[in-house]
Image (cartoon, coloured by chain):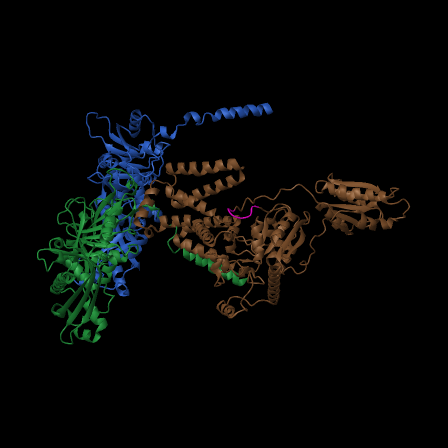
Chain colours: A brown, B blue, C green
Amino acid sequence: MFEFLKGLRKPGSRNKKVNLPIGRPVNEWTNNSHFKKNLGDNLELIRKIYHGSSDIVFREFSGGTNKEFKMAIIYVDGLVDKTIIHEEILKSIMLEARAVKPNSGISKREIYQQILSRTLTAADIYEEEDFKRVLLAIASGDAVLLIDGHDTAICVSARGWENRGVQEPVTEAVVRGPRDGFTETLRTNTALLRRRLRDPNLVIKSHVIGRRTQTDVVVAYLQDLASPQIVKEVEKRLGLIDVDGILESGFIEQLIEDDWMTPFPQIQYTERPDAVAGQLLEGKVVIMVDNTPFVLVVPAPFMSFFQSPEDYYQRWMFATFSRWIRVLSTLITLTLPGLYIALSSFHPGMIPARLVSSMAAAHEGVPFPAFIEALLMTITLELLMEAGIRLPGPIGQTVSIVGGLVIGDAAVSANLVSPLMVIVVALTAISSFTIPNYNMNFAIRVMRFVVIFAAAILGLLGIVLMMLLILTHLVNLKSFGVGYMEPFAPFKTRAPFDTFIRAPLPFLKTRPLYSRPQQTYRGIDHRNDTEQGEVMEKSDDMMPKLSKQARAYQDDMDAKRNRQGDMDEGHEEE
Amino acid sequence: MDFKRCISMILCMIMALCLMGCWDQKEIEHRGMVFSTGIDKLIETEDEQKKYLISFEMPILSGGGETGGGVLEKPWILATTGNTVFEAVRQADIRSERPLFFAQNKVLVIGEEIAQQEDIRMMLDFFLRDHELTRNMNVFIVKGTALEVLNVVPYFSDSVGDYLRTLSRVKYKSSRFRATELSCLVEDLKRNGSALVSRVIPSSAGDEVKLAGAAVIKNNRLVGWLGEIENRGTLFIQDKVEGGSIVVSCPICSELGERAETITFEINNVSSKKEVDIRGGKIKFGIVINVEGTIQEHSGWQYHDLLEQEYIRRMEKVVATEITREVQAANNKLQQEFAVDVLGYGSYLKKTHPDFWEEIEEQWNETFFPQVEVDIHSNVMIRRIGTAT
Amino acid sequence: MRIRYKNMIIFIILSLLLFQFSGCYDSKEIDTKAFVLAVGIDTIEGKESGQKETETIKGVPDRFTVTFELPLFSQQLAAGETEKFWMLSTRGASIIEAIRNSDLRSDRVLTFGHLKVVAISEEMARKGLFPILDFFHREPVVPRKTNIIITEGKAGDAISIIPYQEQLYGIYQEDLLESERSSLPRTAHQLRQTFINLNKMLYGVKEKRNAFIPYVKKSKDNKETIISGLAIIKDGKMVGKLSNAESYALALLLNLTNDRVTIIAPSLIFPGCDLVFEAHDTHSQLKYLGDKENISFGYHVNVDGYFAECPSSLIKEETGKDIDAINKSVEKQLKQDIERTIKKMQVLNVDLLGLDSYLFQKHPKVWKQVAANWDELFPEADIDVQVTVHTRHLGTSK
């Protein structure tokens, strides 16, 4: 089970099987099969392969004046758009066949070319000799046309199935921002992306992963921005995956992440096309998987989990403020219950006398020590959350109301927990929801328990040690070769400007460096234009020198801008 | 076959009904919870048959669940009389509409007078026999009457029983008293009818209780008291000391003429060992006490630097002398004044020299024990001196 | 692999060592602790009163009566006339022993992490402070900013008062001592300052055992305490008192004045009427004026402030406007106060000004000569005082 994971954790350790082709054979018996000239044989073979499944449709028909050309269409019912088969294939062939004069003498050999180049009116057609690929085409929703006497199949893309329309993403709600979200159909998703990025540099590379599911997986990036090393690394890791099924992008995430022995996610996921477009513009690499609206983004250092796409739509002060709130709430979620335990059971001398007085008064008569109390309440909270998620909407709400209000209030009045503890736990719960990413939210919530235990064992010392341990762990993590705590460790002078504060957009001229973009400047790099530019370069020592490619791009852009200027002038003259 | 199985099944289920079932159940608020019980001698002479005045401390639970404190009601002290304990319980049942429930009775307080005059075993029988009662109940003997103690409303708690129990559990480190559990007490009494029981003193103002010292029981009757310091001396011999502080006068300061200056030594860790020597027909016990601890206070701080090695050795010696003196005094009191072997000399002898023990067992308490020579030696190590020099 | 194994072992050993620190086995829930807010320390009265603490076979006789103020938190929110604290009074040969004695009566552990006030009776202070202060110095949990006061009469009575507004005495007393209008030296009430004043290790001069501690009186109705100057501690024993005005003079010389202190001075131009002046910025400078034979110091004190009240100004308008006259009046009064204070110290032979350490630091050659017989020289030393007062504004009165 873990054999392939081992291979993934140390790329290159499995030297022999690295270069496996993507889209490997489905079953052993298809390995030796190939098309024969005889249509009947071919159909027999395919029927045998599909074991008479009822959703595979074999439509045999004849063309030509004397019905001498036997043909067959094979498709999966429900996956194809029947109008295409009807209008573009059957109608065309049959009408065309009727239009051929009786003695025009088209031989059986010519009929194939005739159909391919003249008869079929469908937009997307390709020939396929490989038997395995034809099977894949059928399963993906293509209609396959077989002609008697030819060992090549014509695949017509007639995909069309029921799918969910583009809807507002549920998991990542924003107040301001586009309302469209990814869907389960890969093509719709790539289209949503292409609509936002009309740059020809947007590369969308397709792979097929999963021995049995044969799922389409797409790697998207901006050719001239994304770091070639990271792209290469992503493709290498995707190539190493050897499982029978990919049902969700979560499979991919878990199979290609750097370290699976950590609660912290190293790959970000999102449902929002605008977020993905933004990430692509930062030079990151995107992995999209068919049948899921969740798209993976790499590399994903720690701070990127605390950013919401809305940060960039809001004005900078408010975006900065909400980022502070998020960082603060992360700290609260992680440490507040632990701090309460440590302060009340270990170091009451560290809090002001009046606070101690109210804490002690609140805890008076509660039969449990603070640790048990905290554990009780936090676990109750997790129970409520889990129940709320699993239950259908309206019942979920009832559960949270009953749980939160009734149980909490009753527990306090029954003197089972102190009211202060309820405040602490409620504050923790609310804080944990401000973390935009659910993955990270989960990680922090789990770590909170660890901190609670540390506080119960060693008090404040335990909290400090545990935080140190967590920090050490975070600094050690890597996401696709990028340090998890970048840009703080190693520290970059500009680190705070798109992390703790979101600098005003006119000042956000550079891309984040952790994604190692080929071009660091978002706009035109003026550094070499004027003296002022030179000063800037000196002052900003962390900027790497522009690569040749980037320089070329920049020249290109300059030229374009000049041209634009010319045109504008011309326009004015008119 | 199936029929037979069916019948036996039904029979089993009917038999199960003979056990306790829903008809026996009683809601928690319908039970008269007893937190502590006090036993006194009945003074009134009009009813001569009755021996005991027995009082039960029953909390009034109506105000429960009130958050934020408030004035809580004083528990109900229900006092009845009886010739036996159980008779008094039945008497109380008549007066309380809720039947008395003893599973939470954690404290038993026995008055001074009744303990002197009656065999203690007679009072304890009920507490051992009733299935509701737990044997880890704390037993105290009052200097005064038990009713006085039960009537105290302590500052930090609503129930004096609860207060006494926490006090004896939390403060065992002071070594000034002993926490006596019912089961241990009964074991001691069975052995030779003598035991040391925790002593409780009610304050004259009636708002406080103090747990200090021990009651000495000989032949199942109270014969006298041990003070708090003497009690610690006996704990040293039994190797049960967990803490406490010892005040001695500062050796350097007294040389300088400041006789009042003191050193307070806090005990952290104690181990003591017994040895016995019966050569020459004389029984001689040797007790070695090793103490580790901290200097907690040195009131003559201006006179001397505490960090000096030689001075620390000197202080150790002074403290060791004080401990030896303390233990010796306690031992003498028990041996000479009360002539009661509660510290386990006899059982130690029985374990180490069974043959010899068989010879002298009969006369041990009267003849041999008061003659036993006890040699006490203590060693002290000062580990820390606090944050000042 | 071997390195990893080694690291693992080191890690395990380190984490085992962690348990040498205080851990969960030492932790005490907040409601099993009794926070001591104030401690009052008295001498044992000659006549035995109340129960005997220890039926003793111990060698050292009891020496202190110690009273602890323990707040009852459960009664904190309760309405009406309930008791908010427990005054627990015990006795012992040392402070620790008194605490241990209290252990037998309170089921909660006495905790000194929130100690606000240490009150010592005058009688006790005159016998000596060192035996008392040792506990507060040695015990790590006692906060160093705890207030220390010396009370007229019994300290146990003084801390048992029930203030009007505050429920607990400890907090009341702390607020009172920290008032910015207090005329005492700024840090006089802190335990830390007392330790510094008394500590022999601090200065290389000699064993310094002089200190000043606020002196507090209890009102007759048991509702208030009144700060009335400083107690002078010489060699760890109280030897005298400074009044409030003298305490302010001392604060001026030590540069430890509070921000807004009221000075009352008789008016020079309208006799029989007092001026009220609020000082808010003061600065004093010390200079050595003597040579190797004559010991002579010079103080220059600068006081800035404003004019708060001049009752005579409505009768005779210029009395409220003549800034020069106002300055002169205040200067005269302050000079008198300061000189009286210095005289007092010289009579008692208590050098609270730190003149010895000033010489040691700034004029080591002079110090070398006088060090041996400083105790004889100080009472004779010539200390010259100059006061300059600046009135910054006169208020809104015309």
Q: Is residue C81 left or right of residue A345?
A: left
Seen from the viewer's position, the closer of residues B305 and C148 is: C148
Tell me if residue A176 is in the magenta stretch.
yes
Q: Position of residue A323 (x, y in %)?
A: 46, 53
Quarter of the C terminus of chain B within the rendering: bottom left
Seen from the viewer's position, the closer of residues C232 and B110 is: C232
In magenta, the rendered stretch is A174-179
Q: Position of residue B358 (x, y in %)?
A: 33, 44
Tell me if residue A386 is in the magenta stretch.
no
Q: Position of residue A63 (x, y in %)?
A: 84, 43
Which residue ends up furthest to the right in the rendered image? A103
Which residue ends up furthest to the left in the rendered image? C271
Seen from the viewer's position, the closer of residues C192 and B373 is: C192
Seen from the viewer's position, the closer of residues C322 and A453 is: C322
| Rendered image quadrant of residue B321 | bottom left
- Magenta-colored segment: predominant secondary structure: loop
Q: Position of residue C65 (x, y in %)?
A: 19, 50
Residue A26 vertical placement versus B162 (above, below): below
- Whether residue B179 is visible to the viewer of this picture, yes or no, is no
- Whether residue A446 is visible to the viewer of this picture, yes or no, is yes
Residue A544 vertical placement versus A47 (above, below): below
Q: Residue at x 35, y 35 (%)?
A: B65
| Rendered image quadrant of residue B305 | bottom left
Quarter of the N terminus of chain B within the rendering: top right
Say how many tags the image has.
Answer: 0
